[in-house]
Amino acid sequence: MKFEEFTEKTVLVTGAASGIGQAQAKAFLENGANVFAFDINEGGLSKLQQEYPLQFAYTIGSVSVKNDVAHVVKEACKVFGKIDILLNTAGVLDGFAKTLDTDEALWDKIMDTNIKGTYFMTNEILPHMIARKSGIIVNMASIAGLVAGGGGAAYTASKHAIIGYTKQLDMDYCREGIRANAIAPGAIQTPMNQADFAGDGKMAKWVAEETPAGRWAQPSEVASLTLYLSSSAADYIHGTVVPIDGGWTAK
């Protein structure tokens, strides 16, 4: 999928060291964008910098730490001059823990990363976008934000919060040139889901069988949807949650 309009645009991606975030970074780089990545792990970020030395830069830190967030935005603006698109992709799972199996530490870890991190990143970048009367934000929700069963108590609560936050964000700022939407992935084969494929892969096979499409998706498929939602072709799509789940929520 090619979008010439991303040339000269700058994209900030959180959680870009692996999985969906890394696929998003690659997709925008391949479409000519400048990409500034942010992750708590270095992972494959240095490799991307070698492949795209003029288009790609990154810093290491946590979306849940306000000072780290302020630093990454400052660095991104220093390197590329502006931020046109924010992809709030960083997130953590909770091991499908039920509420009685979720202690305060786990609850705080999930909420701090998944929802507070999105809030921190958005509030740090939003003033820059409003000043330019232009900005696109794509938040990473999940089918767990739409139905039960996609995660444990904390994860499901956090992804429901992402969807509500996205809708309110767009409503509050769409007249100021901001467009915010969310993506709700289902079964995507990423390092976060590696445990499902362990051993004989029984869990992964069950998930594929329960998915109407009959398979897991690849991170690149979510990245392609992100390209579309960030493009001018999607200019009238506001405050929406787009499932990419192989039909899971249609059951």
Image (cartoon, rainbow, N blue to C red):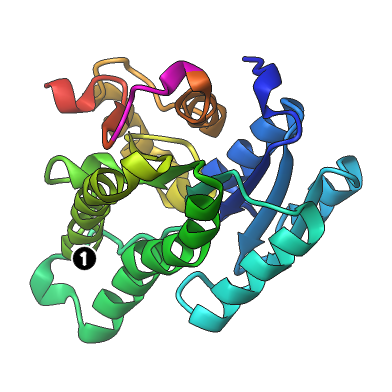
Relative to 242, 43 lies left or right: right
Image location of residue 120, percent across then percent down: 43, 69
* Residue 153 or residue 11, whichever sits in front: 11
Q: Residue at x 49, y 80 (%)?
A: 65
Q: Main secondary structure of the magenta part?
A: loop
The residue pinned by badge 1 equals 154
In the rendered image, residue 144, in percent from the top left (x then y), is placed at 22, 46
From this view, report whether residue 38 is shown above or below residue 12.
Answer: below
Name the element at disc 1. helix
In the picture shown, does residue 144 fall above or below 66? above
Q: Is residue 175 left or right of residue 13?
A: left
Q: Is residue 149 above or below residue 70?
A: above
Tell me the quarter of the image containing the N terminus. Answer: top right
Residue at x-position 67% and y-position 33%: 28
Q: Is residue 109 above or below residue 14?
A: below
Q: Which residues are magenta?
A: 233-238
Residue 199 appears anywhere in the view:
no
